Image (spheres, grey):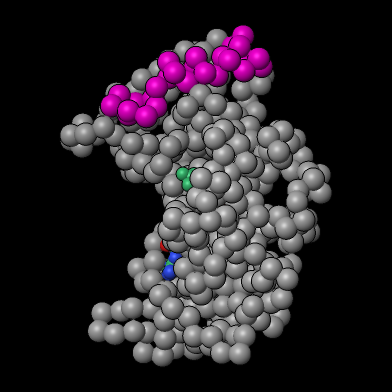
Amino acid sequence: MNRKTDIVVVGSGIAGMTAALTAAQSGKKVTLLTHGVGSLAISSGSIDVLGYVNGEAVSDPFKAISDLPENHPYRLVGEADLRASLGWLKELCGKAGLTMQAEEGNHQLVTVMGTLKPSWLTPISFCAEAMKDVLRIAVVSVEDMKDVHPGLIIDQLQRYPDLAKKEFAKAILPNPIHQAHRNVTPLDIARYVETPEGLQWLKDSLAPYAKLYPVLLLPPILGMKHSQKIWEELCASLKTRIVEMVSIPPGVAGLRLREIMKKALNEAGVYLVENTEVTKAEVEQGACKALTTIATGGENRWEADSFIIATGGLLGGGIGTAPGKAWETIFKLPLDMPENTEEWSSPNIFGNSLFAKMGVKVNEALKPVDAEGNVIFNNVRFAGRIVGGYDFAAEKSGHGVALATGWHAGMLAVKE
Ligand SMILES: Cc1cc2nc3c(=O)[nH]c(=O)nc-3n(C[C@H](O)[C@H](O)[C@H](O)COP(=O)(O)OP(=O)(O)OC[C@H]3O[C@@H](n4cnc5c(N)ncnc54)[C@H](O)[C@@H]3O)c2cc1C
C-alpha cells in the first residue's frame, strides 16, 4: 500500500501527538504512525518544565533557560515557543474539562514515595498548595494497594522542614474490589470510582476522615475520564480539600492526559495508525521520500512532504545501542558517544551521565545536523526525547521538552 499525506509523524508520546495536533489544527493532512503508547502513559501527567540546572533547584524555569547549554532543546526552541506550547496544552485540556494549573514558578507535587517533586503545569487535583495553611492532614491508601504506604509517606514528608510540624494521620480505606484476587493499583480503583457505586464507596469511606482533616492526600484514584468532576464533587460534598499524589506506573494522570490528546487527534482528522513500526526510510538527495512499515501481507509505504520523528529514547524505541555505539533507529543516524561504554555513565547515580543526554543533534528548526552543523535531511524534524543534549530525569524537564519541541516541529512543518 502507498499513501501520501502532507506530514507524517512517527510516535504517539506527548511529542508526536503534539506535533500531529498542531499541524492538523493548522489545516495540514497528517498521518501519525506509532508502535506503542509512549511514556506519557506511565507518567504523572504533570508537565515538568525545568526543576534543576546542574543539580541546583530552579524556582522559575523560564529565567533558568539562559543557564542551559546552547544545544539544549529549550535554547533551540526558545522561551516564546515553550510558553506557547504550554498555553496550547492548557487550552486543549481546559476544553476537555481538565484544568491544568500553573504559577510563574515551579510548584511541588507530593509523590507516593513521600517526596516533593517540582513541576510546572499540573492537573488541579494534584496541586498541593492547600497543605501550606493547614495543620492536620490525612494520608489515604486502600487496603491491598501495595505501592502506597501512608506510614512511609508520612515519615518521608516530615523530613521536609515546612512539613515537619504538621499532624499527619494514616487512613486505609477498605478494598472495594476484592474479586481482583491480587494487589490493587491506583488505576484499578480509579476505574471503579468512575462508576456510580464506586464514587459512592469513595464518598462514604472518606467521610469520617473529612470531618477531622481539612486536607486528604490520596493516590490518583479519582476516576479516569471524569476525574475533575469527581474531584470537585468530593471536595464540595465532603467540605475538605483533596490532593492526589503522583504514583508509580501505571500513570493514572498520564493516561487521563493521553485520552484527551487522542480524542483531539481524532477531532482534528489525524490519520492514526497504531501498533505499527516504522522500519526504514527512503532518502534521496538530502530529503526523505517515504517511510516504510511492516504489515500483515507486506510493507506499507508512507509518503509526505515533511516528516516529524518523535520516537523517544532508549525506552520509547527511538535509540538503539550495542557495546560502544548508539544510533537513531529509523534513519540509522549514528549518535556521538564514546567507544568505551564505561564512559557512558557516571559512577555517581545522580551524576552527569552521557547516556542520559544522547540523542540526535538538531538545529533551531529541529532538523538533524552533522558535526559541522550541516542539515542532513531538509524535510525531517526530530522532537521529544530523541533529541540530544538534555537529561530529562536529572533536570525534571521530560514532558516540557517533548511538548515544546513537538509544538515547534509541528508549527514549522506547516510553514513549509
Ligand atoms: C516512568 C516515567 C515517568 C515520567 N514521569 C514524568 C512526569 O511526571 N512529568 C514529566 O514531565 N516527564 C515525565 N517523564 C519523562 C517523560 O515521560 C518523557 O521525557 C517524555 O514523555 C518523552 O516523550 P516523547 O514523546 O519524546 O517519547 P515517548 O513517550 O517515549 O514516545 C515515543 C513514541 O514513539 C514510538 N516509536 C518508537 N519507535 C518507533 C518506530 N520505529 N515506529 C513507530 N513508532 C515508534 C513509541 O512506541 C512511542 O509511542 C517520565 C518518564 C518515565 C520513564
Tell me which segment is drawn in magenta.
141-166
Residue 295 vs 227, above or below: the answer is below
Location of residue 67 in the rendering, given as x and y in whole percent from the top left corner: 79, 45
Residue 107 vs 164, above or below: the answer is below
User: Is 413 left, or right, of 66 in this rendering?
Assistant: left
Location of residue 18 in the rendering, given as x and y in whole percent from the top left corner: 58, 64
Q: Residue furthest front?
A: 340
Location of residue 241 in the rendering, given as x and y in whole percent from the top left corner: 56, 27
Q: Is residue 154 magenta?
A: yes
Residue 81 vs 164, above or below: the answer is below
Res 90 seen here: no
Location of residue 36 in the rendering, given as x and y in whole percent from the top left corner: 39, 62
Picture quadrant of residue 143: top left
Res 155 seen here: yes
Picture quarter with the N terminus: bottom left
Out of 231 and 416, give the one closest to the viewer.
416
User: Is 71 left, or right, of 157 in this rendering?
Assistant: right
Out of 61 and 222, give the one closest to the viewer.
61
Q: Is residue 201 magenta?
A: no
Residue 371 vs 288, above or below: the answer is above
Out of 87 and 230, give the one closest to the viewer.
87
Q: Which residue is painted at 74% across and 67% down in the image?
A: 364
